[in-house]
Amino acid sequence: MNDPVVTDPQLYRVLWENERVRVLEYRDSPGDATHLHAHPDTVMVTLSSFQRVISAGGREVPVDMEAGQVRWLDAQEHQGRNAGRTATHSVFIELKEPRPGAPRRDATLGPSAS
């Protein structure tokens, strides 16, 4: 797995971790982009409003989030770019335990409302 703390240490940092979860802080500025990296199933909490483009496998998805939103992020590999005029500040709560059953093949790229 391409760990975002390793691929983009200037953007991601570990806030806290135990054997079941890892909490990451993400901060960037307009125009900043991440390298290809992976997240397990994750809860994302937005601390600032932002606009980004998430891409993987030839697909691109625009993401427009308001501060204070909470979204689910299916396990996925992607890269992102701050496509807006404001800095991004988010917290990611990564689950270390795999989802029960078979992995989802229809995972949403980027955050989803459910």
Image: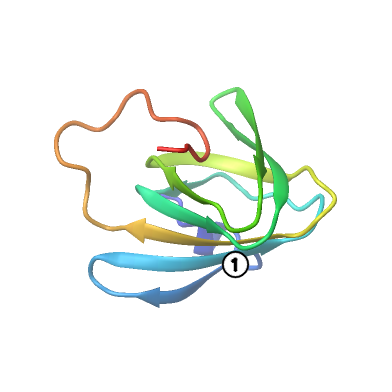
The number of numbered badges drawn on the structure is: 1
Q: Amino acid at mark 1?
A: Pro
Query: What is the x, y in percent for residue 38?
Result: 45, 47
Q: How far from the left and from the top, in percent, is residue 37? A: 51, 48
* Nearer-the-camera pick, 72 or 101: 72
Q: Quadrant of residue 3?
A: bottom left
On the image, the x and y values in percent for residue 55 come to: 61, 33
Q: Which element type, helix, strand or loop, lies under badge 1?
A: loop
Q: Residue at x 37, y 58 (%)?
A: 94
> Mark 1 Cα within 10 Å, few/some/many (few <14, many 20+)?
few
Q: Position of residue 95 (x, y in %)?
A: 31, 57
Quadrant placement of the C terminus: top left
Residue at horizontal 66%, vertical 50%? 66
Residue at 45% x, 30% y is 108
Check the image and name the residue furthest to the right. Answer: 85
* Residue at numbered disc 1: 9
Residue 22 appears left or right of 58 = left
- Which quadrant holds residue 80? top right
Q: Is residue 86 above or below residue 65?
A: below
Q: Is residue 1 above or below residue 62?
A: below
Residue 109, relative to residue 29: is it above or below? above
Residue appearing at x 23%, y 70% in the figure: 19
Q: How is the image coloured?
A: rainbow
